[in-house]
Amino acid sequence: QVQLVESGGDSVRAGGSLRLSCVASGSTYSQWCMAWFRQAPGKEREGVAAIDSNGGTNYADSVKWRFIVSRDNAENTLFLQMNSLKPEDTAMYYCAEAVLGAVVVGHGCNYDMDYWGKGTLVTISS
């Protein structure tokens, strides 16, 4: 079992930056794919960014060149650096992990996510 706990969500103005964190605890795996998803009110959940144990990354077109996904393996922490934030980035952000998964460019993690956090809220005002 893996537990994922997100933090870093806040309310900021457009153009600002935030850094989300997701601490993973419990079982560890040598191969994994972790991802950030978001869900805005009234909208479907969408993948934002993904990273795998080989360093592969993938980004949704809507956040490319603005968001950066990374992971500190020593601290078992996933990050999402979000820059040039826009009101349309407002959403609940979730991190998730797919055990034994890998990034497929243009898609994200190749397996269904096995574990999910409870989310952290990001609100961007204009």
Image: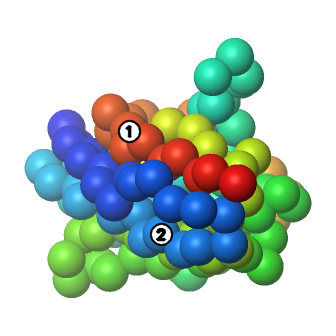
Q: Tell me how many marks there are.
A: 2
Which percent across, then down, holds residue 61?
86, 60
Which percent across, then down, holds residue 111?
60, 41
- Using the rendered image of the protein, determine whether residue 98 is visible from the camera's viewpoint: no
Question: In terms of image quadrants, where is residue 79?
Answer: bottom left
Q: Above or below — where is 114 with respect to 104?
A: above
Which percent across, then down, holds residue 21?
34, 64
| Mark carried by residue 119 | 1
| C-alpha span from label 2 to label 1 | 15 Å
Which percent across, then down, holds residue 42?
69, 16
The answer to which of marks 2 and 1 sits earlier in the sequence is 2
Residue closer to the observer: 106 or 7: 7
Residue closer to the observer: 113 or 71: 71
Query: Could you tell me which residue is drawn at 45 percent across and 53 percent down?
Result: 11
Query: Could you tell me which residue is drawn at 32 percent across and 33 percent down?
Result: 118
Which part of the image, by quadrant, shows the C terminus? bottom right
Which element type, helix, strand or loop, lies under badge 2? Answer: strand
| Mark carried by residue 18 | 2
Residue closer to the observer: 92 or 57: 92
Report crowding for label 2: few under 14, some 14 to 19, many 20 or more residues within 10 A (C-alpha).
Answer: some
Kind of residue indicated by mark 1? Gly
Q: Above or below — where is 20 with respect to 117?
A: below
Left-right relation of 72 to 70: left
Residue most toward the top?
Answer: 42
Question: In terms of image quadrants, where is residue 7?
Answer: bottom left
Which element type, helix, strand or loop, lies under badge 1? Answer: loop
Kind of residue indicated by mark 2? Leu
Report crowding for label 1: few under 14, some 14 to 19, many 20 or more residues within 10 A (C-alpha).
Answer: many
Which part of the image, by quadrant, shows the N terminus? top left
Left-right relation of 93 to 30: right
- Using the rendered image of the protein, determine whether residue 17 is visible from the camera's viewpoint: yes
